Amino acid sequence: MTTAAVVGSGPNGLAAALTLAAEGVRVRVIEAADVLGGGTRSGELTLPGLVHDECSGMHPLGPGSEFARRFDLAGAGLTWRWAPVEFAHPLDGGRGAAVVRSVAETAAGLGAGGRGWERTFGPLTERFDTISQEFLQPVLHVPRHPLHLARLGAYAGLPATLLARRFGSAEARALWAGAAAHTFRPLHTLASSAIGVALTASAHAFGWPVAEGGSAAIRDAIVRRATEYGVRFETGRRVTSLDELGGPDLVMLDTSPAAAARIAGERMPARVRRAYTRYRHGPGAFKVDYAVEGGVPWTHEASRSACTVHLGGTLEDIAAAERDVAAGRMPERPFVLVGQQYLADKTRSSGDVHPLYAYAHVPAGFTGDATEAVTAQIERYAPGFRERIRAMHVRSTAQMSRYNENYVAGDIVTGANDPWQLVFRPRAALDPYATGIPGVHLCSAATPPGAGAHGMCGYNAARRALARL
């Protein structure tokens, strides 16, 4: 029987393990931490009874991925929940904008920016099921739907500030800037629209759901399916060399490229080692979780019904903050993403006390304390928020790296999303999962299609590994 070892148990490592096992491979998963799941872990970080997502929180591409559908994760106990509003963006004075599933309804709330919004995202949303299957795999492939993919590509390569010109109101431009900021790149750079376009179209097509009971439910569903196929799991064991694995036919590394190079040692070809050690990581995330009594008193009404709220002011404000972060400077008012998962999933709260998830974009390896900056941004758009805080839990960039070693210097998206790495990650190769060592493959979020708890990096890597057997 063919055997495989999977190093790392994030959603991609687990997806690779399940995909291999379903084809008759005998698989064991080895995890350095004491708990499986990587970025899909949840816990009572602040007060008993409050369930906080420790990293991944909202899952725009989770329900629609080929991996989730093939293995029927819903049938394995994973339940998706949606809030009335997919994401919102408050501005000063109670103004703001929001995205709901309907493109037309969203556009109607954007004033002069509505026409441009509908012209941009209407056609993408109509075709998003086929479009998403194209970009959730390596960029270098023969597309099944080239015209659909070309429509996405026409916007994806643009600087976000340039695409913003299609949206004729300050509210619409700010709403777009919040989505585009997920790229963790300055908004004036080439291809800084790519992730924002995909995520916004996904919000209209699939929504931005959360997993009932916490993101750990994603891990649990995959583990349940994998166990059905005989996958074995070992936690609390750090792998430092391929020699420790006992010679399996296949090895899947759910690690950063640099860690993969260390584990492979001299067995990795020099050209691959150079590429992996030169792989660029992006800015960091500084995370603060709150226990909040009564919820957040947003002055912008739609933000009170949104699972995701983007904070940072106008397009120009967010662009300036992201420029500072990329240059290694901590902005006074950073871009902050707030998660109100409890609005979709009531099981996460305890009475009228709710878990609130927030992180700020900060420079890579930021050593300061951004707690006050995050709190101040929320208070700016929700006066009285401070008075409702009952407890907090803080995770700095250094603590984020210790929580998950793939998050180098706090980089939760496992790699800089510059134009080169958007196309060629982790290196320029026809098979981006191959390490140059027969049978050994990289399957982390440093490979296509990148970050997210959709499992597609591991799924794609496992399929390539199977094809090479």
Image (cartoon, rainbow, N blue to C red):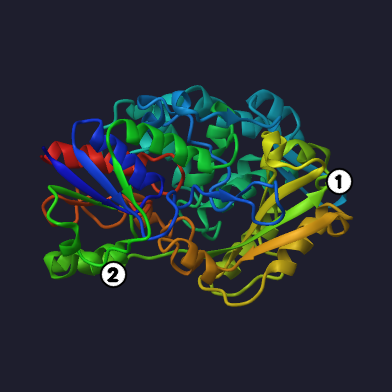
Left or right: 63 in relation to 384: left
Q: Nearer the viewer, residue 7 or 59?
A: 7
Q: Nearer the viewer, residue 89 or 309?
A: 309
List x then y, in percent, for residue 319: 62, 59
Left or right: 432 in relation to 168: left
Tell me: residue 237, above or below residue 347. below
List x then y, in percent, for residue 162: 56, 49
Query: Mark 2 — residue?
Result: 277
Q: Quadrant of residue 253?
A: bottom left
Left or right: 394 in relation to 266: right
- At a point 47% along the width and 67% down the height, the residue shown is 402
Can you name the residue that lies furthest to the bottom here?
367
List x then y, in percent, for residue 294: 84, 45
Residue 75 in sight: yes
Query: Mark 1 — residue?
Result: 299
Callout 1 amino acid: Thr
Q: CA distance from mark 1 to mark 2?
A: 47 Å
- At a point 38% along the width and 65% down the height, the residue shown is 280
